[in-house]
């Protein structure tokens, strides 16, 4: 696989010919395909520690989702998130009424396996078995290649709609 994107200038020129919405559709489509490469690698990593005796499966809860418009604006492009359903929840103490409130978002609603955090990050009594970060660090080149190839196809597809 090539790490040089020799046709990057050509992709940018042809992308700039599209209207704003068509540009966003093309980029989102390509970014999602690249993110799915990392998702599949994370699922394979999670399968290594899933207990076959239980019904819950961490690897089934890993998902890809598009970032919010606020995130896209902040980075100046399209954001794709790869995470576990249920997200990383944290609780804060509300000073007014001294009750705990959940802060933070989730990936497509509550997840069925809340304990993925303990496995992935470890606890004071067990070592971490990371599965998300290694997937990203080992497969980002492949994801970039898939994204670049998909971008060319998506641009052609969107250009036909004009």
Image (cartoon, grey):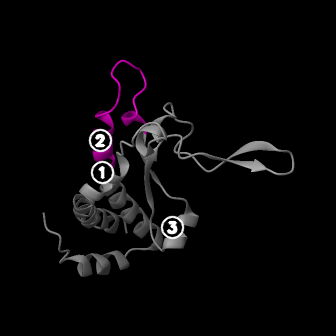
Q: Residue at x 56, y 45 (%)?
A: 106
Q: Is residue 132 above or below residue 114?
A: below
Local packing at callout 2 (Cα closer than 10 Å; few below 14, some 14-19, many 20+) is some
Looking at the rendered image, the disc whose residue lies closer to the viewer, 1 or 3, is: 1
The CA distance from mark 2 to mark 1 is 7 Å
SS label for mark 1: helix
Span colored in magenta? 37-61
* Residues tagged 2 and 1 counted as in contact (Cβ below 8 A): yes
Judge left or right: residue 38 versus residue 78: left
SS label for mark 2: helix
Q: Position of residue 156 (x, y in %)?
A: 27, 66
Labels 2 and 1: the sequence-earlier one: 2
Q: Position of residue 113 (x, y in %)?
A: 48, 32
Residue corresponding to mark 3:
72
SS label for mark 3: helix
Looking at the rendered image, the disc whose residue lies closer to the viewer, 3 or 2, is: 2
Labels 1 and 3: the sequence-earlier one: 3
The quarter holding residue 4 reads bottom left
Judge by depth and name the residue closer to the eye, 109 or 150.
Answer: 109
Judge by depth and name the residue closer to the eye, 156 or 11.
Answer: 11
* Residues tagged 1 and 3 counted as in contact (Cβ below 8 A): no
Q: Position of residue 18 (x, y in %)?
A: 38, 74
Local packing at callout 1 (Cα closer than 10 Å; few below 14, some 14-19, many 20+) is many
Residue 135's tag is 1
Residue corresponding to mark 2:
45
The CA distance from mark 1 to mark 3 is 23 Å
Labels 3 and 2: the sequence-earlier one: 2
Local packing at callout 3 (Cα closer than 10 Å; few below 14, some 14-19, many 20+) is some
Q: Is residue 57 above or below residue 87?
A: above
């Amino acid at each position: 696989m090539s790490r040089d994107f020799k046709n990057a200038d050509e992709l940018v020129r042809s992308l700039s010919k599209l209207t704003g919405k068509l540009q966003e559709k093309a980029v989102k489509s390509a970014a999602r395909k690249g993110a799915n490469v990392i998702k599949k690698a994370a699922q394979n990593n999670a399968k290594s520690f899933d207990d076959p005796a239980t019904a819950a499966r961490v690897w089934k809860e890993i998902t890809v989702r598009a970032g919010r418009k606020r995130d896209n604006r902040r980075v100046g492009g399209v954001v794709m998130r790869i995470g576990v359903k249920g997200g990383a929840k944290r609780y804060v103490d509300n000073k007014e009424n001294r009750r705990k409130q959940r802060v933070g978002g989730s990936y497509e609603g509550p997840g069925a396996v809340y304990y993925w955090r303990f496995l992935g990050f470890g606890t004071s009594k067990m070592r971490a078995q990371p599965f998300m970060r290694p997937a990203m660090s080992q497969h980002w080149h492949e994801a970039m290649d898939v994204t670049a190839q998909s971008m060319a196809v998506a641009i052609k597809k969107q250009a036909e709609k004009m």
